[in-house]
Amino acid sequence: MQRQASLLSRNFEVTVVNTEYSETESAQTVELTEQDGFKEVRVVHPRGKGLIERRKFLEKALDAGLDKVHNVDLVIGHVVIPKGLQFVQAKKYFNCPLILVEHASYYRPEIRKDRSLVHKLILRKTRKKVDQIVAVSEFLRHDMHPDFQRHSISVIGNHVDTRLFNYTPKKKSGVVKFLHVSTMDEKTKNPEGILCACKGLKENTSDFQLTIVCDEDVAQWKHLATQFGLDDQIRFVGPLQWSELLPYYHEADAFLLFSDYESFSIVLAEAWMTGTPAITTPVGIAHNMSKELGILVDKGDKKMLASTMLDFIQNGRDRFNNQLIANHGKHYSDDAILRQWTSLIEKHVG
């Protein structure tokens, strides 16, 4: 959200209002900052006891934040659950259009049925007041359709900062280098599946290296890699800033993604921007990926992932046109995405 705010601030005056509760604070605080071209109003408030009191504290906190913002022409709300009613409150406060941007994973068919009554209520009430809906990928738009059958859903992807990510020709070495960048979240990223595939791959060749970049605690995955005898093949790096990722993409022969679900996957866009082909499940922006951009593997199929990696090691590096991949990545450049957002915003504010 901060990255998008910074991007939009190139053409518009942007203020981010962020409310968050504290378990320890007994009084509300408001903080104003300015960074990366946009202003941010951060309101920290007591959580409260019980649903009614919590709702009261939340509404009061948002009013305090909105009171610091002036001359608003448009409200953009990110991710309807759990704060969709705040988007509606802001729309009413400023009497202006509301655009909902979705990049969450709770539209997955297999978990849609598990929504709580509160979440269903938030979605229903917010849906009635939304003027425009934006999904970050065609893949997500398809999953959102059952919840927004009467709405038109536009697709505008997340952007990759071209000041940080660029293309350079790949330098081949004897060892094929794979790269994976994620949170290593077991619920969606399938990190165990990746390590199991590497274990199977090593039964055929040890001429590969997988770099895993993660900002979270990876102790359990390091331990599993050691158990699998992969210490020489897998290295863990992180945490890193966004600006520090580029060298890892440049040295990678292929990007590896084995997720069960992605609403977009910014790391795929980053890989393509650097001319790096992907070995990935058909999720997010890879759902209908062409053969020129990489190789699709079935979700959860560790043997297929291992055999695909082996095939890439044997003859995959000469199969892909890295410059063509980088040209495709420009679809997600900051300039391209800003043009799409500017056109949509001007449609609603004149």
Image: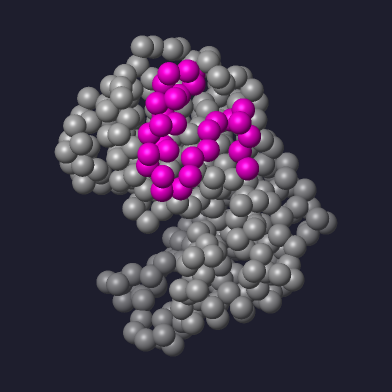
Position of 80 compared to 179: left or right?
Answer: right
Q: Which residue is drawn at 65% across and 30% down?
A: 328
Q: Nearer the viewer, residue 325 or 346?
A: 325
Q: Nearer the viewer, residue 6 or 306?
A: 306
Q: Is any part of residue 223 visible from this angle?
A: yes
Residue 299 lies within the magenta run: yes
What range of the chain is rendered magenta?
288-317
Q: Quadrant of residue 158?
A: top right
**308 relative to 323, above or below:** below
Q: Which of 342 and 309 is in front in this view?
A: 309
Position of 265 compared to 240: left or right?
Answer: right
Task: Give the x, y percent position of residue 49.
Answer: 34, 84
Task: Give the x, y percent position of residue 350.
Answer: 83, 56
Q: Which of 242 and 91 is in front in this view?
A: 242
**32 relative to 312, above or below:** below
Q: Residue at x 52, y 59 (%)?
A: 104
Q: Which residue is drawn at 33% across and 37% down?
A: 197
